[in-house]
Image (cartoon, helix red, strand yellow):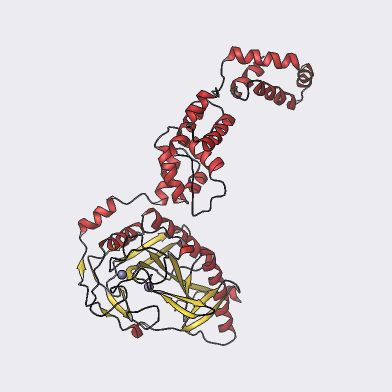
Amino acid sequence: MIDTYEAVIGIEVHVELATRAKIFCACENTAGGAPNSNICPVCMGLPGSMPVFNGRVLELAVRAGLSLDCKIAKKTRFDRKNYFYPDLPKGYQISQNEYPICRDGYIDIGEKVIGIERIHMEEDAGKLIHDAERGTLVDYNRCGVPLIEIVSAPDIRTPEQARAYLTELRLRLIYAGVSECKMQLGQLRCDVNLSVRKKGQTALGVRTEIKNINSFAFVAKAIEYEFARQVGVLESGGKIASETRRYDADSGKTVLMRTKESAADYRFFPEPDLLPFGVSEEYVEQIRANLPQMPASRIKKYVDGYGLREEDARIIVERAALARYFDSVSALTEYKRVAANLLISELLGESATDSFECALPPEHLAQISTLYGEQTVNSSTAKKVLFMSGQTGESPEKIVREHGLAQISDREYLRGVLQQVMADNPKLIDDYRAGKAAAKKAIIGKAMALTSGKANPLVLNEIFENA
Ligand code: ZN
Ligand code: MN
């Protein structure tokens, strides 16, 4: 039965911007600190205080818009969104209603294109802390933290599409330097709007909004649950109520928070303390010219320019910190593919998708890549040197020099080594002549051991084959 329905999903994403100061005052934009230690009359909305717009917020909002292929508004302004809630001391939020800074962007997730209707700038509210002993407490430190809200078109149909959209969106914002988008710190929060309808129908059903989901996995689960719930209500003859719900990770269900406000309830009007302002073409073009490369074109550069396998390029690009590290390394060595292989196989380890930290300076990975690329060391020595360099902080060049680890390719010398191995192991020679493939491996292995692993295995093989 559920197969005859489809979900119509739009996602609103709130992103905290990586500015030094808050959006309308000089308070620091930092998370944490003692409750109510990072506030001032402006972000508390005390009478007589006046907001002053932080220009860096505009710059980051424009960067976000350009990285999501939006059009940037030529004229924009702030509006007051009025509502009462204990975490909002002013009684209104300064946001943008009619003239958002960006419109009409999109993300192509492969399977389809997801539209972005708008991006607007706004201030964050404070935080309620529910304490078992003292009741509900309010921390206003987050008041006035700069946000952008990115509103998708209702183009999403499945949990997988939602995930693909959000993953790409987040990555672009990180590359654009808009935010670090650390979800565990609440730097990126998702609201999901979802309604259902019979497949083939074009009219929209009544939607519910699931607020403040802080992981993409939970977004997918919330969509799955809410889709089934709404279909269940309709199939049993009920009606969907317009309401705000939240996702409860413990039960895997969405639960009712409150019935929904409509836009009229917010009584939006132009913010009288801030003048409307223009955004010049010149300003936008300057930001566009300085925008870092986005994920898709990075993958292309790594594959077409550096010769990486596409899956390796993806592994690197999906972790912005890893990509930055790789860029520093590849600026220093011709052997970029060697560097990528060592990076992924030896250094990436258990790093989460979010982070990559590496004690090895990029110069050292570049050196070892060049030493291996130029066949100065063989692959097992390269890994050994990488490890020693990580342990001691010494440069790979110095380690190879001081420990005499350079690979031996001298044919005369290696022929001598092989002859000695054969003289010492007549049984292996007999086995080899009898056609046992393992015997050859054993002979080469013994020759490698005799040179402390420094022999060039290709040369060894060749000499043995021609002996
Ligand atoms: Zn302040
Ligand atoms: Mn908002």
Judge whether 444 appears above or below 98 on screen. Answer: above
Residue visible at 57% across and 49% down in the picture:
350
Nearest the camera: 126 or 110? Answer: 126
Nearest the camera: 450 or 60? Answer: 450
Q: Is residue 123 left or right of residue 181?
A: left
Q: Is residue 197 left or right of residue 74?
A: right
Location of ligand 1 given as a quarter of the image: bottom left
- Considering the image in quadrants, where does the C terminus appear? top right
The answer to whether residue 158 is visible is no
- Where's residue 447, x and y in %? 67, 21
Nearest the camera: 396 or 422? Answer: 396
- Considering the image in quadrants, where does the N terminus appear? bottom right
Q: Is residue 334 left or right of residue 351?
A: left
- Where's residue 422, x and y in %? 72, 16
**Which corner quadrant of the image does residue 139 belong to?**
bottom left
Judge whether 436 appears above or below 86 on screen. Answer: above
Judge whether 288 appears above or below 464 on screen. Answer: below
The answer to whether residue 164 is visible is yes
- Where's residue 113, x and y in %? 42, 62
Nearest the camera: 336 or 362? Answer: 362
- Where's residue 289, x and y in %? 27, 50
Q: Is residue 193 left or right of residue 53?
A: right
Count of residue discs: 0
Residue visible at 25% across and 57% down in the picture:
284
**Which corner quadrant of the image does residue 412 belong to?**
top right
Residue visible at 46% across and 47% down in the picture:
322
